[in-house]
Amino acid sequence: MNMHILGTGSALPSTVVTNDDLTKYMETSDEWIRERTGIGSRHLSTGETVASLAIEACNKALENAGKKAEDVELILVATCSPEMMLPCCACQVQAGIGASKAVAFDVNAACAGFLFSLNTAYSYLKSGMYKNALVVGAEVLSKIMDWEDRTTCILFGDGAGAVYVEAAEDEEDTYSFVQHSDGVKGMVLKCGTRDLNNPLYKGEEQSKFVWMDGREIFKFAVGQIPVCINEAMDKAGLTKDNIDLFILHQANKRIISSIAKRMELPEDRFPTNVERVGNMSSAAIPVLLDECNRNGQLKKGMRLVLSGFGAGLTFGASIFSW
Ligand code: COA
């Protein structure tokens, strides 16, 4: 069994906020943000929700694949910023696109969430349980940012991306992946949710916003991701010369450049869109994949590495042929 991505789609909020726009709300500058992150602008929600963006991305992915929602068997939504704790976003997507036969649930592995969801879909398809899936990464991170913490809030954006995948039963398997978690170091990037509020509890309130040790995250990504990609290539019996494109989590242009340098690879093998959309956590990889698909960068038979990393800590790399 092999798994193919047959269609991609994405959705971004209509409002674009440039670095210069941000200077109206905080002490910062276009120069500071660009120099340290490569980010020039991001899309921020003025009403779009994780579910509405995910639904739009899924409808586009189905259209791109030429498939009908009623035939979808599995929907996985990776998100760490859903509007609602219940029902999960994937069930809202199921209702929104009319995929009445599908099983739907969310996955939270932060910025590695889409990658882990794609690997989960592959494992279900490989087991023979389902024949196809919609895999989505969707975030409205702007609602969990502390807009008084200028070191963190400038990095992130809102958006959603989706892929439609299908099993090719008789084909040789070319999909391969590795994934890791390091919970011991997890508190370097965190966000609380609800406090215990039963009548017996007298504890302190936790912050409901994202807090990050930027330098530690930077070191983690630049140190671990080349090792992780090499591990995935070894597992697949491939070398970096067999890979056409490396589609990495779009956290920061400097992180991507450092990874390319450590792997002794030219940066043009690492497409980016972080300049225009910022870090969209689980939505970053599928939105970039959709852009590469629609602008003709992806040719049939190309071998791709996808690699995600983020809060948890979680990280991984997947390899497959387009
Ligand atoms: N605009 C202007 N100045 C800012 C600023 C902003 N938006 N944010 C912070 N500063 C200031 C700080 O106050 C500090 O000033 P000081 O030296 O007078 O105290 C100075 O800039 C340096 O701050 P620092 O936090 O040390 O910057 P840095 O060089 O470590 O860069 C990040 C910060 C966040 C850009 C960098 O650590 C990074 O990219 N980390 C990775 C984060 C990431 O990608 N997370 C998501 C992973 S999924």
Image (cartoon, rainbow, N blue to C red):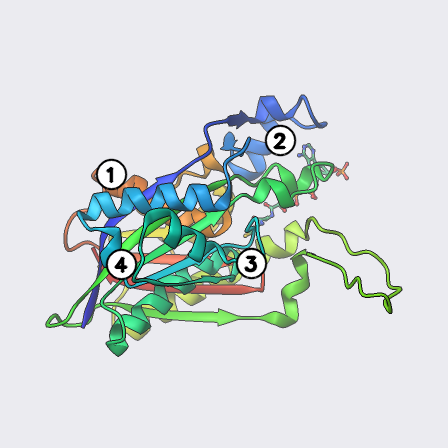
Quarter of the N terminus within the rendering: bottom left
Q: Residue 71 or 186: which is nearer the viewer?
A: 71
Q: Which residue is mark 1?
A: 294
Position of 236 relative to 300 (above/below): below
Position of 110 relative to 12 (above/below): below
64 lies left or right of 314: left
Mark 2 or mark 3: whose residue is earlier in sequence: 2
Please give the name of the residue rendered at 64% of the width and 50% of the height, measured from the top-left corner: 214
Q: Which residue is mark 4?
A: 72
Q: Which residue is mark 3?
A: 86
- Tag 1, which secondary structure? helix
What amino acid is at disc 3?
A: Leu
Mark 2 Cα-neighbour bin, 10 Å: few <14, some 14–19, many ≥20:
few
Residue 225 x %, y %:
46, 61
111 lies left or right of 271: right
Please give the name of the residue rendered at 57% of the width and 26% of the height, measured from the top-left corner: 19
Mark 3 or mark 1: whose residue is earlier in sequence: 3
Mark 2 or mark 4: whose residue is earlier in sequence: 2
Q: Disc 1 to disc 4, how far (Cα)? A: 22 Å
Viewer-nearest of discs 2 and 4: 4
What amino acid is at disc 1?
A: Arg
168 lies left or right of 194: left
Mark 1 Cα-neighbour bin, 10 Å: few <14, some 14–19, many ≥20:
some
Is residue 164 something that shows in the picture?
yes
What amino acid is at disc 4?
A: Val
Q: Disc 3 to disc 4, how far (Cα)? A: 22 Å
Q: Is mark 2 within 8 Å of ligand 1?
A: yes
Q: Disc 2 to disc 3, how far (Cα)? A: 39 Å
